[in-house]
Image (cartoon, helix red, strand yellow):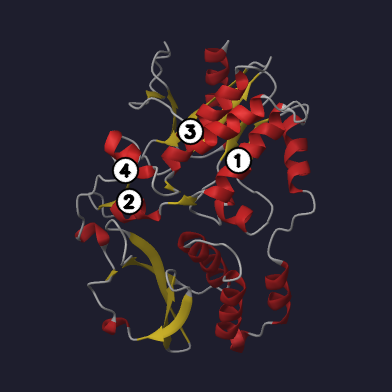
Amino acid sequence: MKDEYIKKFYDELNQNLEGDYKIILEPGRKLTEDWIEYDQVKWELDDNVEELVNKLLKENSLDFEEKILSIYKYICLNYIYDDNVLYFFKRDTSDLNNIKYIAVDWYGRIVDETWKNNRKKHNRRVCYEFARFYAKAINELLKKEDKELEAFMVGDKENLHYVVGLTGKEYSIILDLDDFNNIKDLTRMKLGLTINGIKILRDELGIFQKSINKFNMNKLNDLEEVEKLKNNKKDEDIIKYFNSVIDILKSYNIDSQGFLEYMRAKIEHEEIEIEKIWREVKDSNEKRYVRCLIFNFNAKTYLLDSIEKTLKTINKEDLDRKIFVFNPEENQYHYYGG
């Protein structure tokens, strides 16, 4: 029945979302549809996630859906998004009417033992890695559950993003904790906010929706301190407002990528156009870049620095090009370390 549920999920996916998608499975299945892809890497759990799964297998006070959300919460609180991967996106200009970016295949997807060992030294992961070990964790839980369900990976065909799909007799859902087009649940959870990254495709009995509602109970959609600022801000004091939000974020355990995406959402909400740039992380054991952004307001240019977590006026031409990169696709380097 698992194969049939996967086929049904793929139909549900296409009915609910725009775009071209594929489903990624571990090797050993007999599905041969053109939208099926088999992973080249054996699915494994990080040691600390495996420890949590083993603990949940012995836990009788939580139902299955609560256990799934417990792992979701753990990942969000203990990992951060590795935005270094975005530095490697290739700019495809083969069609000038449809210029787009394409993700490289190797970063987090095609990996060796060196990569896996290096990943154990830090908590940065990309969407493919999150989806791989989260799907594995859910399937480990299912070994002791009397449920017709299975977790797997779902990706768009351009390799830009990957999530977890979970489907079976009771429901079909998508679990996306690191949607880089929005403030990720990886960030929202660290701020104590509601989670927004779970999309329900089918849930006639409301089983999973009830679990989400319970999980989000007493949580806010945005920071209470920021909401108070928002209600009192004036257009002429918008920079002062941004700096006040930055001061609030500094009081939380928020990483550079989380800081950037939260502030980007606030800046773009004011209908201010932004330009993405990159800054090299100095004093790091590896060559790594994080995203920052630039915008113009009232005849001044501002740099939102996600490493320093500051907003300051700049002369764009004065930025050190040995540290800041504007077009990484023109200056890529080979990197396979992890």
x and y, in percent, of residue 325 in the image: 27, 68
Q: Identify which residue is drawn at 33% across, 26% down.
A: 40
Measure how far apart labels 3 and 1 are at the Cα level. 11 Å
Camera-near label (2 vs 1) is 1
Crowd around label 4: few <14 · some 14–19 · many ≥20 (10 Å): many
Residue for badge 3: 133
Q: Earlier in the sequence, mark 4 or mark 1?
A: 1
108 with respect to 310 (left or right):
left
Q: Compute the Cα span from label 4 to label 2.
A: 15 Å
Determine which of the numbered discs, if any, sits on residue 72 in the image: 1
Check whether the beta carbons of the residues at disc 3 and disc 1 lie within 8 A of each other: no
Question: Dots 4 and 1: beta carbons under 8 Å?
Answer: no
As helix, strand or loop, the secondary structure at mark 1 comes to helix
Q: Residue at x 31, y 43 (%)?
A: 107
Disc 3 packing (10 Å; few <14; some 14–19; many ≥20): many
In this rendering, which labeled residue sits more in front, label 2 or label 3? Answer: 3
Q: Which badge, 4 or 3, is on the more N-terminal residue?
A: 4
- Dot 3 amino acid type: Phe
Mark earlier in primary sequence (4, 2): 2
In this figure, which residue is indicated by the disc labeled 4?
A: 107
Kind of residue at badge 2: Tyr
What mark, if any, has residue 101 been given in the picture?
2
Q: Secondary structure at mark 4?
A: loop
User: Which residue is nearer to you in this view: 42 or 321?
Assistant: 42
